[in-house]
């Protein structure tokens, strides 16, 4: 259920400042978004998985904090990130 190494490396290459950048907020937000998408699909099938749903809520809260930080520090990067990830409609 976790992200595969190929998926992670693809996300890091796309959103990172370089190929080894795994700690920047943009990469973390992109990785969390992919994980949230996977869990959302999981909950469409397993509606009663309440323990897993709590983990999903934690991931969403963590992404929200990182998005707030990015918005405070660099609004242009924030705007391009949410547009590219399709977080806000």
Image (tube, rainbow, N blue to C red):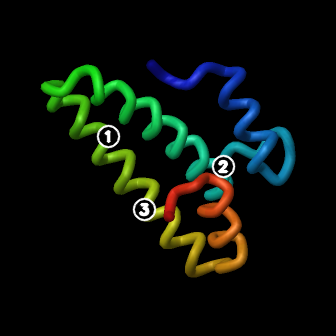
Provide the residue designation for mark 1: 56
Helix, strand or loop at mark 3:
helix
Q: Residue at x 63, y 79 (%)?
A: 73
Q: Is residue 79 left or right of residue 56?
A: right
Query: How far, Cα to Cα, is label 2 from label 1?
Result: 18 Å
Query: How far, Cα to Cα, is label 3 from label 1?
Result: 12 Å
Q: Nearer the viewer, residue 42 or 72?
A: 42
Image: 81 above or below 48? below
Q: Residue at x 58, y 41 (%)?
A: 31
Q: Position of residue 38 (x, y in %)?
A: 45, 30
Q: Position of residue 55 (x, y in %)?
A: 29, 37
Q: Position of residue 60 (x, y in %)?
A: 37, 51
Query: How far, Cα to Cα, is label 3 from label 2?
Result: 14 Å
Dot 1, crowdedness within 10 Å: few (<14), some or many (≥20)?
many
The disc label shown at residue 27, or none? 2
Dot 3, crowdedness within 10 Å: few (<14), some or many (≥20)?
few
């Amino acid at each position: 259920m976790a992200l595969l190494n190929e998926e992670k490396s693809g996300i890091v290459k796309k959103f990172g400042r370089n190929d080894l950048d795994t700690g920047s907020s943009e990469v973390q937000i992109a990785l969390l978004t992919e994980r949230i998408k996977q869990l959302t699909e999981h909950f469409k099938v397993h509606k009663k998985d309440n323990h897993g749903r709590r983990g999903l809520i934690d991931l969403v809260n963590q992404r929200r904090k990182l998005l707030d930080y990015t918005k405070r520090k660099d609004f242009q990067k924030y705007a391009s990130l949410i547009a590219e990830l399709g977080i806000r409609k």
